[in-house]
Image (tube, helix red, strand yellow):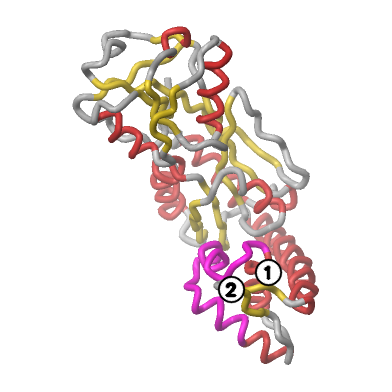
Amino acid sequence: MLELSRLRALHAVAMHGSISAAAIALGYTPSAVSQQIAKLERETRTTLLERQGRGVVLTDAAQQLAATAQQLLALVEQAETALEERRGQPTGRLVIGAFASAARGLMPSALAELARSHPTLDARLVELDPHLTPDLVARGVIDMAITHDWDISPLPAPDGVERAVIGDDPSDVLVPAGHPLAGHAVLHRSELADQRWICQPPGSVCHDWLVRTLRASGHEPDLAYQVAEYQTQIALVAAGLGIALVPRLGRSAVPEGVCAIPLEPAPVRRLYALWRPGAARRPAITETVRVLRDHWPLRH
């Protein structure tokens, strides 16, 4: 008889594209995932993974088995949801995917409350790109996701996913203390032209917002430093190298020599929790959404 844990490992490799990524999603080591696949190959007497360069690819037989595994895992989720709903208490495993600043600024206190209040709930966190998580939720790779959108780029609602608003995260302009803008109580978008910018790389919503906003005012932005991590951007601002637009969530206190100035109208990203409709009755889902909202740190 095929073991569900081994089918789950194969399904994760199929969904994530590699053993290492599957291990992160499952909370295992890569060697543990490899061992599960090897056992499944022996049980089925079938080659499931083939080496290709530094990675692996699924054989045709593995693709077929992974599709069956997805159906079985969906049935297991339905059964677990029904049992959890009957008990009326959050229980079982709940894998949550969150982007970096949400993982840092929101999840620690929320996860601590869930662990303290619901010891039978095994809530787990995986840091993921917010653009990937809606599809991962829809396909059943993770149970819930924390993602976001901006005013210029609303989050599309993919088929098979429900969502709830967690909170709004405004952004400030960070400038060196000696900068000509440092004395302003509020900045307006017309004042942002002709500045040397520190921003995220192309493809990020923050980068796109900055480019669109400055071009709309007739100015081509000078994007001198393009780095993904906000903490690195803040360090570059502190060094006097430029100014940056940084969301408040997950942002540590600005260091000495840096000023955070509100922008009017304020660019805001909105955070959502996503889950599959089939899991909506799970007390684990409803309780986690409640706790995330209660622990939202940016109250006005």
Q: Quadrant of the N terminus?
A: bottom right
- Which label number is shown at residue 209? none
For the residue marked with disc 2, what is the amino acid? Gly
- Percent of width and height locating residue 183: 26, 9
From the viewer's perspective, is the residue at label 1 or at label 2 nearer? 2
Give left or right: position of 89 versus 111. Answer: right
Tell me which corner region of the image, top left, top right, bottom left or bottom right, holds residue 67: bottom right
- Type of residue at label 1? His
Label 2's element? Answer: loop
Q: Residue furthest left?
A: 256
Please state the horizontal and vertical placement of residue 93, each as a whole percent of the image.
Answer: 56, 62
Look at mark 2 in the image and give the residue it sits on. Answer: 53
Q: Nearer the viewer, residue 227 or 286?
A: 227
Q: Which secondary structure, mark 1?
A: helix
Position in image of residue 17 (x %, y %): 63, 65
Nearest the camera: 207 or 258? 207
Residue drawn at the location 74% of the way across and 66% of the way down: 70
Residue at left offset 28%, top offset 11%: 180
**Image position of 246 with respect to 49: above or below:** above
**Residue 242 at x, y = what percent?**
33, 25
Is residue 31 located in the magenta-colored stretch of the structure?
A: yes
* Image quarter hosting the C terminus: top left
Q: Residue at x 50, y 61 (%)?
A: 122
| Residue 168 is a magenta residue | no
Quote the CA–CA distance across marks 1 and 2.
21 Å
Per the rendered image, the range of residues in magenta is: 15-38
Q: Which numbered tag is attached to residue 11?
A: 1
Compared with residue 3, is residue 117 higher up or lower down, i.e. above or below? Answer: above
